[in-house]
Amino acid sequence: MAKEVKKKKKPKKISKVRRFAENTILVALVGIMLLSAFNIYKIVSGYMRDRKAYDSVSTLAGTMDFTGNVDFEELRNINPDIVGWLYYKDTKINYPIVQGQDNSKYLTTMFDGSYGGAGTLFVDYTTEKAFNQFNTIIYGHHMRDGSMFGDLKKLKEKDYCEKHPRFELITPKGKYHLEIWAFLNEPADSSLYETNFDGEAKSHEYIEKIKALAEYTTSVDVTTDDNLVVLSTCAYEYKDARYVVIGKMVPWTEAELQAAKLSDLKKNK
């Protein structure tokens, strides 16, 4: 008996509606990929542009290879709001500090006055005597590439602080080590964002509050006679979180000042 030959089934035709839907989804996915790639390009190019701008500022200020010498005259020619320079070894923090008429301008204004997402490190505009009073607050963005105050997150680990215990703060009037005293993770509306203290009692209360709230404190001795600097940037651990690093201003020794002068003389030969 002859075997029955089975007829092959013809493939089902894909309906026009289904094909249209598949093509639409494909186009949408390609569009999303292209848009994502464009957005990444914008972010990366923005970081590169801002970094290049601050490299130019550092070159003019003479701080690319930091020795403690800062050309404030050159910086004033670019921006008269300049009040200081902050440097932290082994991080990207090597920037000018300004003080404006409000706390909004320098969120998106670069030191040279151009627009930039990195903005500029700035002192709270209400501060009456920046770096010459009990506490001075400096704000800066937490950039994803670690620039501006992005590297403050490294100080979450006390071990990192022990290996990198101080910033360098240079002002038109003096050179200071900023000895790290405390690290905190506080909300944006924290009562720590207070300045221009009236009287020793208020300053003492502030010190005790920091001790109570700090993630950790160091062995640095702080009294109401000291000048503190509060560094603040965004954190992403909860809504409106802030990393806060507090340091004590300690003047450079005479030997350190002489070494900086010698370095400046060698550079200018």
Image (tube, rainbow, N blue to C red):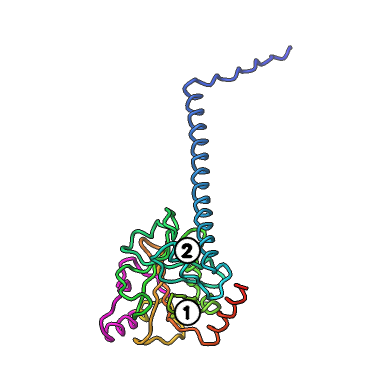
Is 190 contained in the magenta span? yes
Q: Quadrant of the C terminus?
A: bottom right
- Residue 57 sits above or below residue 250 on the image: above
Q: Residue furthest front?
A: 269
Q: Residue type at mark 1?
A: Lys
Mark 2 or mark 1, which has the lower sequence index? 2
Q: Nearer the viewer, residue 80 or 156?
A: 80
Is 80 contained in the magenta span? no
237 vs 5, left or right, is left
Residue located beneath label 2 in the image:
148
Residue 235 visible, this orientation: no
Q: Which range is magenta?
A: 182-209
Residue 125 horizontal/vertical position (percent): 32, 67
Residue 117 horizontal/vertical position (percent): 43, 55
Residue 29 horizontal/vertical position (percent): 50, 36
Q: Nearer the viewer, residue 194 or 130?
A: 130
